[in-house]
Amino acid sequence: MGKQDREEAYGNPAKHDPSFRGPIKNRSCTDVICCVLFLLFILGYIVVGIMAWVYGDPQQVLYPRNSTGAYCGMGANKDKPYLLYFNIFSCILATNIITISEHGLQCPTPQVCVSSCPQAPWTVSKSEYSLTVGEVFYAENRNFCLPGVPWNMPLLQSLQQELCPSFLLPSTPALGRCLPWYNYTTVPELPGISSNASIIQGISGLVDSLNARDISIRIFEDFAQSWYWILVALGVALVLSMLFILLLRLVVCPVVLVLIVGVLGVLAYGIYHCWKEYQVLRDEGASITQLGFTTNLSAYGSVQETWLAALIVLAVLEGLLLLLLIFLRQRIRIAITLLQEASRAVGQMMSTMFYPLVTFVLLLICIAYWAMIALYLATSGQPQYVLWAPNVSLPGCETVPVNTSCDPTAQPMNSSCPGLMCVFQGYLSTGLVQRSLFNLQIYGVLGLFWTLNWVLALGQCVLAGAFASFYWAFNKPRDIPTFPLGAAFIRTLRYHTGSLAFGALILSLVQIARVILEYIDHKLRGAQNPMARCIMCCFKCCLWCLEKFIKFLNRNAYIMIAIYGKNFCVSAKNAFMLLMRNVVRVVVLDKVTDLLLLFGKLLVVGGVGVLSFFFFTGRIPGLGKEFENPHLNYYWLPIMTSILGAYVIASGFFSVFGMCVDTLFLCFLEDLERNDGSLDRPYYMSKALLKILGKKNKAPPGNKRKK
């Protein structure tokens, strides 16, 4: 396709506009309908949050309940923050820890709120059966019976009705519950438990399942010991990221050269390695005809045809890359110069480097709001209690209406059925909010995706407006606006909230479709046949490609919105047509930028990771006491935290730089189409770009653009 045909297929080049001076200031609101819908949706999102706050009760998750339904650590039980299980082994022997956690750590055993967990092992003896509850429990300061058990009740009766515990184990608080520990020397004989071995096994299994508590304490201690050194590492990552971006104007050419040579070298080594392996296997006579067809893919590594095919593929890639470097060398030079210009633009507007902090705070607010709504909605509804008995076949239990509703505060004290109690079953699903719970949760998920994508779109459009102000300033830095970032932020919020919401909604719907597809794939994974798996994989791949394309289109549409102030569809169309008219330049710049930013991230993250490793493992000699590495339980914890933080910081800084490159590139393409270098239509690009393109401005250097 020739140049003229390509222009006809993808629209006509932009025409010169003598009144154009960069981002248009006299603009009007765009995509008003979508703006109204978005604001109405946000209003509904707030209403859902209010409804969740009114009907929800997260205390049901945060605070444990006793057998009467009262919270521990609140109200009448304010001084009793811990929950004690009469027979903790019923939790272990009756079900597994996963099921227990899903039901709020509820067990088929009486539970009571206590001020402190038992510290010593104890079990009732036969000689105490004739005594009263007050003599055995209250007089010995064992306040572990259910509320309302009188002093003069016979002990044997209280044990039969499970109003008081028959044994106590040394326990420690975890998740608001008294959970036993087993590092004591003597184990008491416990009623209903067959052997001491089962006790040790049960407690050991429970402690192993909830060992996360001890780990969390150690993690907290490590953070308390090393938090300031982690902040130092993050500061180093911040400085390295800024220096890398600011120094790109000086070192971008040699860095890109080194990266290109490195890629060529890796491919060349791959060709050499494949050739050596092919020679060895060829001499041994190992052929694919001897192996035949097998599902063991590793077996194909021992035949010569595999290495020959890999050699051919790598050789073709090496040849193509060399040809591209030869024929696209001028476009690579343009890409390198644009990267230098982007570094210069960031240096002129340092405030843009810290705008990702605003985006991060807004994203945090969106996620926190959704998490609170989800928590409150999940806990909306009153708790429901039912009658339960450990063995309904015992005498006196035949007529008991098991699994019927009951009031835990009016639990029968003198029932003829042993062990009959009123236990927690779940939350009632009656009521307007409870009946619409699923729909409200779906609304919340849509709100999460839409608001997150809108915040990201806001950041892209604001940065694009600021960097476009830099490019379209004829005399830099004199003609750059005083507060380009602030002006772009106000301009975007005032005029283009609807356009950003439109693009964010399209992306959100695709992302939600991907989530639904992943959920279906997870649910049907065990029942799928190979054909179904193949179809599912194709759908997932198509949606992934669609999401990537929409992100790319939205990003460039937001740049055009920031510059010209048109609606989303027109901006997306103009951006796409402009890019397609210069598709080769787009590919070259995109790949060079990706390679450079990847190198920058590896440099920052790798540097911080290596420095953190040597410091926290004490391998840097000669440090004084002020810089001595802290003593840690897990030295890898601050190292991984530093690496993760360095990656987040580098990604934030480089996202700004990437947006700058994309904005300057679109402005550069528009500049080429709009202007010709004459006195009336001078180029706005830098002298370096003019030199590469073999063009020049007729206006003397430093002169103002002709009005």
Image (cartoon, rainbow, N blue to C red):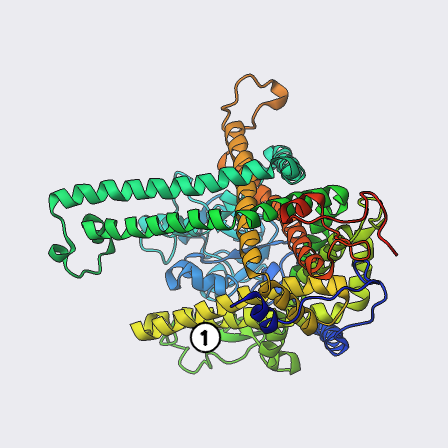
Along the line of sight, the residue nearer the viewer: 585 or 133: 585
**Residue matched to label 1:** 416
Q: Is residue 507 visible?
A: yes
Along the line of sight, the residue nearer the viewer: 290 or 282: 282
**x%, y% of residue 537?**
39, 69
**x%, y% of residue 666?**
67, 58
Quadrant of residue 558 in the image? Answer: bottom right
* SS at badge 1: loop
Q: Is residue 432 left or right of residue 309?
A: right
**x%, y% of residue 353?**
71, 46
Q: Image height check: is 3 above or below 625?
A: below
Name the residue located 55 percent from the left edge and 77 percent from the top edge: 406
**x%, y% of residue 670?**
70, 60
Along the line of sight, the residue nearer the viewer: 215 or 195: 215
Q: Please name the amino acid that badge 1 sits on.
A: Ser
Q: Image height check: is 421 above or below 269?
A: below
Name the residue located 63 percent from the left edge and 51 percent from the top edge: 658
Name the residue located 63 percent from the left edge and 39 percent from the top edge: 248
Name the residue located 69 percent from the left edge and 57 percent from the top edge: 672
Q: Is residue 422 visible?
A: no
